[in-house]
């Protein structure tokens, strides 16, 4: 049944892609003599439409919940505007486009090296004998990529320079449904490349990849929603709930309390449960980074209000760190 829904959605996106291309893009490109790029643009339109549908679905589903059952009430929602901008940039596929332009030559090179040196692809669904069961092979890939995502997230917190990039995500003190895509672009490109390389290696089909990323995006937007949602204790142990992820954003608990912090799971909390990094505490704590707090709790450090400032300050913090003037995550001394 789910397979049919995915096929229907794929047909819908394909139809919109053709209509938009024939009706709008093609005449424009013809007019400006850019028809040489038309094929590439046609392909990338697929991502753009998936992104637009995602924004529409997330907004329709989550915005009413935030309005009706808010967890935190903010008098001023200005801080959210930057996150909305991040969402548009990410969902319109601009990050994927950057990855494609920057890293595609590298991927092609690796692929040819793999052929030359007889490095085999682990075709996971083939090995498990589930190639003819698309739903099972989809589930297997989702779990494998999520495990990879868990480790990526732990490393973001473990290594100081990497943390400075990830701090762009954590510096939002008003966590809402828009917070998911608030990331440093360099980190987004690294993450996309990391998933693309793993997907190539384990034999994920391109059309499966689109759905895997779309499902992951939707679940991650739900995790950041600023609303009280009644998650059953069992459901909460099957997929990451907003309360579980909010704990990861909590000052003093999520990313500084213990050695590495807690609740790093991206879609499933299983890896946190298995590796001892899960916290089920539901106390609503302030979110953000300790050194953003006013003196004496913090140093009132500025992480930037606008997108460009946030991106730039991360590089400045990395510079300080490399010069030995800054230590781990949220030193306030
Ligand atoms: Zn984090
Ligand atoms: Zn988050």
Image: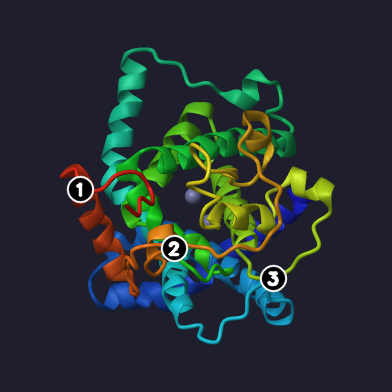
Check if mark 2's residue and mark 3's residue have beta carbons within 8 Å. Answer: no
In the image, residue 224 sits, relative to residue 80, either above or below, namely above
Q: Which residue is mark 3?
A: 227
Task: State yes or no: Cβ of the residue under disc 1 lies below 8 Å from any atom of ligand 1.
Answer: no
The reply, left or right, for residue 136 in relation to residue 175 is: right
The picture places residue 120, in percent across and down from the top left corner, at 45, 16
**Mark 1, secondary structure of its residue:** loop
Q: Nearer the viewer, mark 2 or mark 3?
A: 3
Closer to the chain start, of discs 2 and 3, is: 2
- Marker disc for residue 325: 1
* Vertical placement of residue 239 versus 289, above or below: above
Where does the image place residue 279, in percent across and percent down from the top left? 66, 45
Mark 2, other Cα within 10 Å: few <14 / some 14–19 / many ≥20: many
Looking at the rendering, which quadrant does residue 316 occupy?
bottom left
Q: Secondary structure at mark 2?
A: loop
Q: Of the two numbered discs 1 and 3 on the same chain, state the one appearing first in sequence.
A: 3
Marks 1 & 3, CB-CB < 8 Å contact = no
Question: Does residue 189 appear anywhere in the picture?
Answer: no
**How many angstroms separate mark 1 from mark 3 (CA)?**
39 Å
Closer mark to the observer between disc 1 and disc 3:
1
Question: Mark 2 sits on what residue?
Answer: 182
Residue closest to the far top: 118
Depth order, front residue of 242/104: 242
Q: Pick whichever, 258 or 188, lies toward us.
A: 258
Residue 177 seen anywhere in this rendered image of the structure: yes
Q: Residue at x 58, y 34 (%)?
A: 147
Q: In front: mark 1 or mark 2? A: 1
- Counting other residues with Cα less than 10 Å from the Cα at mark 1, is it few (<14), some (14-19), or many (20 or more)? few
Snapshot quadrant of residue 93: bottom left
Q: Position of residue 41 (x, y in %)?
A: 37, 61
Left or right: residue 63 compared with residue 174: right
CA gap, disc 2 and disc 3: 19 Å
């Amino acid at each position: 049944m789910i397979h049919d829904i995915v096929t229907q959605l794929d047909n819908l996106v394909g139809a919109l892609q053709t209509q938009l291309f024939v009706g709008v893009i093609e005449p424009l490109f013809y007019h400006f003599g850019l028809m040489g790029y038309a094929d590439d643009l046609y392909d990338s339109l697929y991502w753009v439409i998936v992104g637009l549908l995602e924004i529409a679905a997330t907004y329709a589903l989550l915005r009413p919940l935030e309005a009706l059952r808010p967890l935190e009430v903010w008098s001023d929602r200005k801080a959210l505007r930057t996150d909305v901008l991040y969402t548009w940039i990410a969902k319109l596929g601009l990050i994927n486009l950057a990855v494609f332009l920057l890293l595609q030559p590298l991927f092609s090179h690796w692929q040819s090296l793999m052929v030359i040196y007889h490095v085999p692809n682990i075709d996971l669904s083939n090995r498990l004998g589930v190639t003819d069961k698309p739903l099972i092979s989809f589930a297997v890939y989702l779990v494998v990529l999520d495990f990879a995502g868990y480790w990526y997230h732990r490393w973001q917190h473990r290594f100081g320079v990497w943390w400075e990039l990830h701090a762009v995500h954590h510096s939002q003190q008003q966590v809402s449904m828009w917070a998911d895509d608030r990331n440093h672009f360099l980190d987004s490109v690294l993450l996309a490349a990391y998933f693309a390389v793993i997907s190539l290696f384990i034999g994920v089909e391109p059309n499966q990849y689109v759905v895997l990323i779309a499902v992951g995006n939707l679940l991650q937007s739900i995790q950041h929603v600023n609303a009280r949602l009644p998650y059953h204790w069992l459901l909460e142990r099957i997929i990451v709930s907003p309360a579980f992820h909010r704990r990861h954003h909590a000052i003093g608990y999520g990313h500084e309390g213990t050695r590495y912090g807690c609740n790093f799971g991206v879609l499933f909390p299983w890896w946190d449960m298995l590796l001892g990094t899960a916290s089920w505490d539901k106390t609503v704590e302030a979110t953000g980074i300790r050194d953003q707090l006013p003196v004496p709790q913090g140093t009132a450090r500025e992480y930037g209000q606008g997108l460009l400032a946030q991106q730039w300050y991360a590089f400045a913090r990395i510079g300080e760190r490399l010069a030995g003037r800054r230590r781990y995550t949220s030193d306030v001394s």
